[in-house]
Image (cartoon, rainbow, N blue to C red):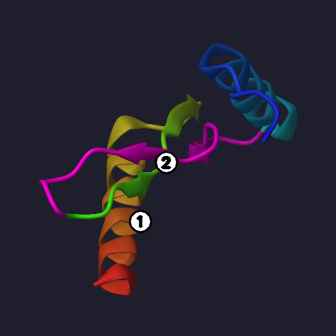
């Protein structure tokens, strides 16, 4: 990967995308920021590769309770698939 993506630039693009759709919406967007790095571990263990991720969110004309309900559903769905 060439260069890590800038957090503020991604935030602006996500906000512009929602405004361009011109419908009440919200989005949570995560991305891998760069190459994985080796992390130190306990003596005698192999170092593990760990990636750094960025996360932004944007809300466009969405009532707070609707966004919370949607995010709660998405979190529950993610957990049920991951575990």
Q: Which mark is residue 74?
A: 1
Q: Residue at x 33, y 48 (%)?
A: 68
Q: Which residues are magenta?
A: 23-44
Left or right: 63 as drawn, with respect to 18: left
Q: Which mark is residue 40?
A: none
Instruction: Report helix, strand or loop for mark 1.
Output: helix
Instruction: Report helix, strand or loop for mark 2.
Output: loop
Q: Residue at x 61, y 21 (%)?
A: 7
Foreground of the two, 27 or 29 = 29
- On screen, 46 above or below 42? below
View extreme (top): residue? 8
View extreme (left): residue? 42
Characterize the local packing of mark 2: few (<14), some (14-19) or many (20 or more) Cα atoms within 10 angstroms: few
Quadrant of the rendering where the N terminus is positioned: top right
Q: Which mark is residue 51?
A: 2
How many labels were placed on the picture? 2
């Amino acid at each position: 990967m060439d260069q890590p993506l800038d957090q503020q630039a991604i935030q602006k693009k996500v906000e512009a995308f929602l405004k361009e759709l011109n419908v009440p919406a919200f989005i949570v967007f995560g991305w891998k920021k760069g190459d994985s790095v080796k992390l130190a571990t306990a003596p005698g263990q192999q170092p593990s590769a760990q990636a750094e991720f960025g996360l932004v969110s944007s809300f466009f004309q969405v009532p707070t309770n609707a966004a919370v309900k949607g995010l709660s559903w998405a979190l529950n769905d993610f957990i049920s698939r991951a575990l």
